[in-house]
Amino acid sequence: MRTRGFEVVSRLEDENIKLPERSTRLSAGYDFFAYEDVIIPSVWNCLENIKPVLVKTGVKCYMQEDEVLELFNRSSNPKKFGLIIPNSVGIIDADYYNNEDNEGEICFLFYNIFPSAIKIEKGQKIGQGIFKKFLKADGDNAVAERIGGFGSSGR
């Protein structure tokens, strides 16, 4: 029986996508890698229409119903590249896996706070994910089913 892990999304099975991995045996987080080159413009050059840039990984994950994968920025990204995650942490729920919109592909959102555009290259480490158990409150009666992909539960 599978408990938790990572897979390449089907449209990229022939693209040599690198699955997340821990860098050391005591690392909590799994490092994620960009699956394509992406340019992230400086927020200073687009102040009137600031939007975070979505960086795709080509990877999806499966886990138990009482688990979540939390996505965090790499600690070196703000200092070295000026990259910050707008909401500080991303949440991947168990029902995101294989959703109809994007098959559950994990993506990172970034703003670039440096004065010049930054290029993320294919295969570059962009963030990390940590699997965690979560608890439900007394009286929790959520029964709705996921109907989409990235950001869909807040439609």
Image (cartoon, helix red, strand yellow):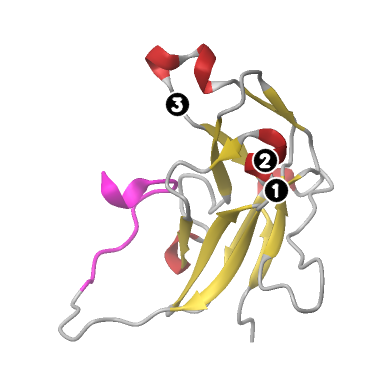
Which residues make up the magenta segment?
Answer: 142-155
Q: Nearer the viewer, residue 91 or 94?
A: 91
Badge nearest the viewer, 2 or 3: 2
Badge 1 amino acid: Ser
Residue 110 rendering spot, x and y as whole percentages: 55, 37
Badge 3 amino acid: Lys
Badge 2 amino acid: Lys
Residue 121 rendering spot, x and y as whole percentages: 78, 34
The correct choice, above or below, for 62 with respect to 59 in the image is below
> On the image, numbered disc 3 is attached to which residue?
51
Q: Nearer the viewer, residue 14 or 126?
A: 126
Which residue is found at the position 38% from the left and 13% from the top? 48
- Alpha carbons under labels 2 and 1: distance apart: 6 Å
Identify the element where label 2 is drawn: helix
- Would you say residue 96 sits in the magenta stretch? no
| Quadrant position of the C terminus in the picture | top left
- Alpha carbons under labels 2 and 3: distance apart: 20 Å
> On the image, numbered disc 1 is attached to which residue?
76
Residue 71 rendering spot, x and y as whole percentages: 55, 57
**What secondary structure predominates along the stretch shown in magenta?**
loop
Numbered tag placed on residue 142 in the rendering:
none
